[in-house]
Every structure is written in structure tokens, then in C-alpha cells.
Amino acid sequence: MKESDVRKIRKAMEKELDAKRYEHTLGVAYTAAALAMCYGKDRDKALLAGLLHDCAKCLSNEKRISICEKHNISINEAEQKNPFLLHAKVGSFLAMQKYGVTDQEVISAVLWHTTGRPDMTWLEKIVFVADYIEPNRNQAPNLDAIRKLAFQDLDKALLWILKDTLDYLHAGKMEIDRMTQKTYEYYCMNAEEGDSALSADADEKEERK
Ligand SMILES: [Fe+2]
Ligand SMILES: [Fe+2]
């Protein structure tokens, strides 16, 4: 994708999103690009995926559901109850159909940016982590430590974000997408030995289910 295309998409996002979401989007795009540079990956891909990740965030739930129905995009139980979760699926569809993205890695990074998935690609990880740590975020616990860790060990940062996200959802008795839980379990299993605190926590969660 050319630089002019990236500029076009940035302008489209400015129109499509509300001011706060657009600020967040720029934060994610530049943080994703910084992470890509840190890990020797393609920063333009990271920038593009970051710019598009929330492209369906400012649509109404009705609109998101109608796009899914019209284009045979499946809706799971958690999404049925909380249609805002659909913004990732609908966003990846719009990235292709509306914004003309053909790069499967970018489309997939948009698709998995809210739940993650087991065995994520580098770009999926970078967008997922950037979404959580971008500079406009200030609510989540452990942000300073996670921000630092993201540039030192991406998988560890990813695992910590998944853990804190699940803790937050459990505490608020909120709907948990099965994929978020599955992703957490996958990365716990893959965590290096020595990260026993996190692994022990995963066992505990497994028992609670
Ligand atoms: Fe999002
Ligand atoms: Fe986001």
C-alpha cells in the first residue's frame, strides 16, 4: 500500500470516527508502528492496521448487526449480547470492502484486535498490545509496567494484558468472549518457565469455570 493510500485512510478515519476515537486510533497506529520498529517488522503494515482497527467502532449496533446479516458474517453468543464486540469482525470486513485493503495480515490484525487468538501473528500481537498501551489510555492497572514490557518482551506484555482484561471482566461480571479466555490459556501454556505467578493464576481460573 502506498503512502498516499495510508493518508487517504487516515482522512477517512477522521471523518468516520468521533474525535476521541480518532485520537485513540492515531495513538494505536503510531504505537503499533513504534513496536514494529522495535522488533524489526514492517512499520507501514503496523501503521495501517492500527489506523483501521476501530473503523467500525462508531457505527450503531443496528448497523453492525445488519452488515453481518447482509454479508453472512456469523454472530456468536457473546456478540449477540454485546454487539459492540462485533466492531472487530465488521471492521475487518470494511477494511477489505470499503477501504480496499488486500493484505490478509492487516485484515486479520483488525479481526483479532479485541480478543486475540492462540498463536497470533506478529502484527496481530502488535495491534492488540498497542490498543491497550497507546498514550491516551489511562484507566487500566499496571499500564506503566506493561508499556515498558511491550518494548522488551511482546509475548509477556500480551499475556499480562490478557490477564488484566480477564480480571477486569470477571470483577465486573461482564460477558467474556470465549476466544479471550482461550488466548490467555494458550499464552500461559507457552509462557517461559519462571513466569509461575501468571501460570498459577491461569490454573486457578480454569478451576473457577
Ligand atoms: Fe476496538
Ligand atoms: Fe481500539
Image (cartoon, rainbow, N blue to C red):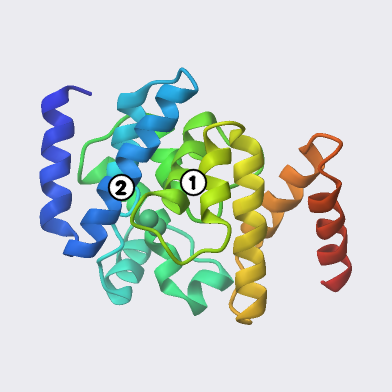
Q: Is residue 35 above or below residue 64?
A: above
Q: Is residue 167 above or below residue 47?
A: below
Q: Residues within 10 Å of mark 2 (few under 14, many from 20)?
A: many
Across and down, in percent, residue 141 comes to: 56, 63
Q: Regarding mark 2 in the picture, which secondary structure is present there? A: helix
Task: Measuring from the top left, give residue 46's x and y in whole percent.
Answer: 36, 32
Give the residue drawn at x 77%, y 38%: 191
Instruction: Provide the residue designation for mark 2.
Output: 27
Residue 72: tell me if it is visible.
no
Is 34 in front, or is 105? 34
Q: Quadrant of ligand 2?
A: bottom left
In the rendered image, which residue does mark 1 sit on? 128
The amino acid marked with disc number 1 is Phe
Q: Can residue 91 be seen?
A: yes
Q: Amino acid at mark 2?
A: Gly
Front-lying residue, 76 or 132: 132
Judge by depth and name the residue closer to the eye, 2 or 98.
2
Residue appearing at x 37%, y 61% in the figure: 87
Q: Is residue 123 left or right of residue 59?
A: right
As drawn, the label of residue 5 is: none
Among numbered discs 2 and 1, the one appearing first in the sequence: 2
> Residue sitting at 27 percent across and 70 percent down?
63
Identify the image quadrant of the C terminus.
Answer: bottom right
Horizontal relation, residue 194 to residue 168: left or right: right
Which of discs 2 and 1 lies nearer the camera? The answer is 2
Callout 1: SS = helix
Query: Is ligand 2 closer than 8 angstroms to the Cβ of mark 1?
Result: no
Residue at left 17%, top 40%? 9
Q: Quadrant of the N terminus?
A: top left
Farthest bottom residue in view = 173
